[in-house]
Image (spheres, rainbow, N blue to C red):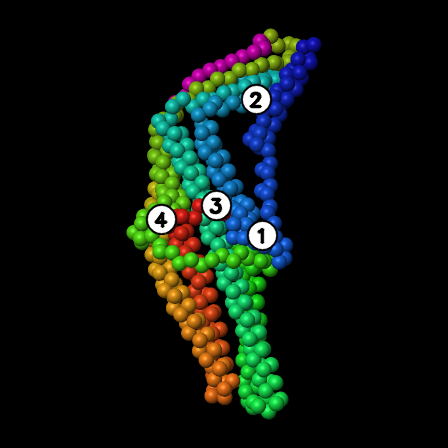
């Protein structure tokens, strides 16, 4: 029975170590769940702006990366907070021959003694009692860094929404350009057919027919380019949504409304609440707390330790006592010289703090510049829309007049083709100005911190 006792304790201690290992953070949390995937509509399906934004917020890899980074930041905060709790470990030590085990806090050395088998198992706990605010500052730094990641997630949501809206309005613009090109091809095809019929009746010259054919060919080439640009814009829209989708959607026909923006001073003030700037300020605060934590390493650390277990030697000739044991004590440690480790850690944290402050100032200036530029661009494009609408109206009147003159024999086909080119160009300028205005409007909303990531 005495021979089996050490082996039994060995098995129990091994089981204890196994259970502690199985209950680590990885076993408690489990594998992270795979993020849901959202598929866009099939080829030729309807895609509204709200659906595009929702798809991006669910499936974009940029947001999945931000979510994972936020989880990692939370884990770092909990790692720093772990110093508030006792550090408990289990020990199982075996010694055979002339070696001896020191069954206190650590395994010690031994003098040469008669051969003997010794089994020692136990548990040791170490609790940090006071460290003059080092752990508190470290936890605060990690918590502020975690909050910075939360703001980073919001900033990424805003930029994803902005990219989707830009890509959506760009696709709308190019779809409108395709419609204009198709309409131009139809109208020039009708005119060509009419002039061809008059040419066969010898009422018009071959020159008129050739000129009209040249303009029809130009219109067809314009249509090909417009369709290719539309497909490219759909590919950009899929990239903005973070999905692999078709290159053909039916988009919502959103109206283009000219709205007077709020005063520039108000928009600049709102930009100070932009998540990108708030993230930078949280990083500054985190770096300040880290500097305080690094400086507190110069101060003492007070800890309490306790351990207990079983000591079982096996030697029939030995009269050494065996059985349970325990020990307790306190420890105060203070660094005297660390090879300039702490000094350089303080210097590194201070440099990171300076860099974070510079980054925050740079972001604030960039947002102010972006708000100002987008604000002026919306005003300019609003005026361009009014001018383009007037140009379209005037060009259409000129086209009607040139057609009437051509039918009456008072004008040439050159006047008609030039008028058609002017109408097409005016319509394209109007479409570009309208949707560029929408893009500038959402860019201004993003810079002013008004895009919340909600479709």
Mark 1 or 4, nearer chain start: 1
349 vs 416, nearest the viewer: 416
Screen quadrant of the N terminus: top right
Look at the picture and state if 143 lies above or below 104: below
Q: Is residue 425 above or below residue 206?
A: above
Disc 4, SS? helix
Identify the main secondary structure in magenta.
strand
Residue pointed to by mark 1 = 243
| CA distance for labels 2 and 3 | 54 Å
Residue at the image point whose x is 53% and y is 15% from the top: 308
Q: Secondary structure at mark 2?
A: strand
Residue 297 position, x and y percent, is 37, 32
* Residue assigned mark 2: 91
Does the magenta portion include 42? no
Side of 356 relative to 410 (left or right): left
Q: Residues under labels 4 and 2: Cα distance?
A: 57 Å
Stretch of the chain drawn in magenta:
320-332
> Relative to 418, does residue 24 appear above or below in the rendering?
above
Give the percent coordinates (x, y) of residue 246. 61, 57
First reached walking from the N terminus: tag 4 or tag 2? 2
Residue tagged by mark 3? 454
Q: Which residue is mark 4?
A: 271
The x and y percentages for residue 410 are 47, 88
**Real-space Cα separation, disc 1 to disc 2, in angstroms:** 52 Å
């Amino acid at each position: 029975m005495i021979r089996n006792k050490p082996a039994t304790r060995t098995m129990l201690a091994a089981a204890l170590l196994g259970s502690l290992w199985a209950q680590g953070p990885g076993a408690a949390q489990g594998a992270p769940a795979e993020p849901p995937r959202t598929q866009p509509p099939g080829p030729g399906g309807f895609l509204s702006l709200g659906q595009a934004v929702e798809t991006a917020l669910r499936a974009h890899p940029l947001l999945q990366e931000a979510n994972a980074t936020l989880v990692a930041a939370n884990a770092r905060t909990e790692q720093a907070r772990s110093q508030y709790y006792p550090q408990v470990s289990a020990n199982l030590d075996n010694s055979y021959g002339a070696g001896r085990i020191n069954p206190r806090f650590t395994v010690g050395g031994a003098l040469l003694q008669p051969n003997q088998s010794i089994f020692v198992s136990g548990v040791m706990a170490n609790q940090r009692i006071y460290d003059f605010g080092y752990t508190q500052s470290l936890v605060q730094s990690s918590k502020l860094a975690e909050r910075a990641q939360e703001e980073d997630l919001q900033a990424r949501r805003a930029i994803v929404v902005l990219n989707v809206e830009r890509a959506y309005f760009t696709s709308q613009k190019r779809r409108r350009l395709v419609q204009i090109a198709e309409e131009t091809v139809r109208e020039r095809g009708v005119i060509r057919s009419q002039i061809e019929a008059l040419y066969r009746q010898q009422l018009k010259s071959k020159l008129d027919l050739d000129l009209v054919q040249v303009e029809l060919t130009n219109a067809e080439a314009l249509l090909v380019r417009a369709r290719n640009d539309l497909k490219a814009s759909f590919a950009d829209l899929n990239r903005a949504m973070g999905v692999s989708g078709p290159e053909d959607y039916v988009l919502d026909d959103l109206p283009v409304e000219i709205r007077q923006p709020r005063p520039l001073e108000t928009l600049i003030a709102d930009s100070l609440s932009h998540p990108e700037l708030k993230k930078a300020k949280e990083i500054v605060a985190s770096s300040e707390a880290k500097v305080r934590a690094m400086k507190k390493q110069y101060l003492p650390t007070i800890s309490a330790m306790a351990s207990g277990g079983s000591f079982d030697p096996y030697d029939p000739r030995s009269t050494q006592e065996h059985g349970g044991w325990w020990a307790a004590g306190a420890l105060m440690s203070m660094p005297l010289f660390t090879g300039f480790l702490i000094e350089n850690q303080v210097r590194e944290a201070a440099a990171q703090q300076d860099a974070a402050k510079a980054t925050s100032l740079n972001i604030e200036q960039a947002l102010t510049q972006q708000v100002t530029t987008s604000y002026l661009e919306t005003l300019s494009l609003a005026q361009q829309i009014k001018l383009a609408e007037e140009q379209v109206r005037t060009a259409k009147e000129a086209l009607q007049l040139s057609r009437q003159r051509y039918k009456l024999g008072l004008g040439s086909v050159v006047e008609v083709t030039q008028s058609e080119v002017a109408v097409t160009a005016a319509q394209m300028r109007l479409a570009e100005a309208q949707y560029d205005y929408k893009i500038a409007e959402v860019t201004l909303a993003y810079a002013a911190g008004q895009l919340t990531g909600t479709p």
